[in-house]
Amino acid sequence: MQHITLTGLYGTPPAELAAAPEAAIQFSPLIPGSGRLEEQAEGSLAEMHVLAPPGTVERRYAMALALRALAPGGPLTALAPKDKGGSRLAKELKGFGCAVSETSRRHHRICACERPSRLSGIDEALAEGAPRLDEALGLWTQPGVFSWNRPDPGSALLAQNLPALSGRGADLGCGIGTLARTILASPRVESLMLIDIDRRAVEMAGRNVADSRAAFRWADIRSSGAGLAGLDFVVMNPPFHDGGAEDQSLGQSFIRRAAEALRPGGICWLVANRHLPYEAVLKSLFRRVTARAEAAGYKIYEAMK
Ligand SMILES: C[S@@+](CC[C@H](N)C(=O)[O-])C[C@H]1O[C@@H](n2cnc3c(N)ncnc32)[C@H](O)[C@@H]1O
């Protein structure tokens, strides 16, 4: 019989709470380059460490995938902050047939168990968390992706205010591709690069944006310029949360990346929550910054390089 030795990791659990071996294979869809847990053969992992995601459907899906990929008897460590799903983790794992022991440390609940020989409820959790065509949105989406089951009001406001763009452009943090669909309605757009750190979003955007002018990249805007240069336009609704905590520097990195990617005279269209201090960064990197609209707590900027 083949000896199973692979360790899997999902996300980056705080090292002091759950040390995972360095050789572990990363499976988080939010870490570009990671493996696909959906495609990992059943029973092929010896051990698994999971920082469980906050959304209930997304978390149950990730835990079901982790348990399916584990060999029977293989140890699973799953943890989450108490107020971000941690308090429900033990019950959910028990529902899958696991005998769980639970500890509490540093505002996290840490669950340990072995993969039972018989799992229960796995197929339901996998079906619920899988990509789906949302009838109301008319789009492919997946639980866990940004604004996965409701239109984002900021993006809607930006879409209403976008002029018909032209030339070569990029959609930074493309999500499931809602803004890209508006952008590509202009026949004068020659090409559009859609980039997101979330593999699931990039894959759903690929299904939602069937247009030969579109290209897709799974990348972290902070560490990869994705070869963007000399663009005529950039459109974005930058994130202001990283791992659940407000992080204004993330949005500022998006603005910097947009400025680098544009040609002189190129335009960046941006929507942001009104309270976010992006105006100073925009003004330091662009020749002209104009507030084009404001509604429902959001502000739209047009910035010329
Ligand atoms: C506010 S949402 C906008 C999504 C989409 N453009 C829309 O309007 O519906 C921001 C997007 O940025 C992505 N994102 C967050 N951090 C990122 C990073 N470092 N690099 C690339 N994309 C990132 C998120 O996954 C999310 O899809």
Image (tube, grey):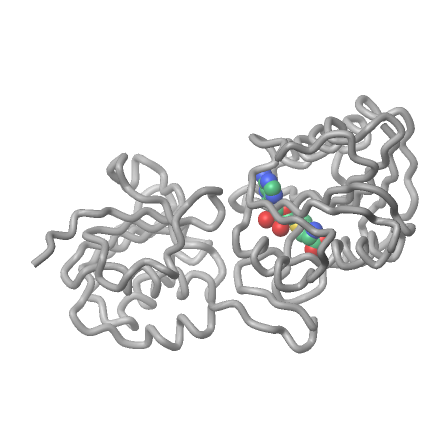
Residue 131 showing in the rendered view:
yes
Determine the image quadrant of residue 201.
bottom right
Residue at the farthest front position: 212
In the rendered structure, the answer to whether residue 95 lies left or right of residue 272 reads left
Determine the image quadrant of residue 168.
top right
- Percent of width and height locating residue 101: 20, 58
In the rendered structure, the answer to whether residue 94 lies left or right of residue 185 reads left
- Percent of width and height locating residue 233: 82, 39
What residue lies at 42% left-to-right and 49% top-to-bottom?
Answer: 28
Q: Is residue 300 above or below residue 95?
A: above
Residue 101 showing in the rendered view:
no
**The C terminus: image quadrant:** top right
- Percent of width and height locating residue 252: 69, 31
**The N terminus: image quadrant:** bottom left
In the rendered structure, the answer to whether residue 223 lies left or right of residue 293 reads left
What residue lies at 77% left-to-right and 27% top-to-bottom?
Answer: 281
In the rendered structure, the answer to whether residue 277 lies left or right of residue 31 reads right
Judge by depth and name the residue closer to the eye, 170 or 240.
170
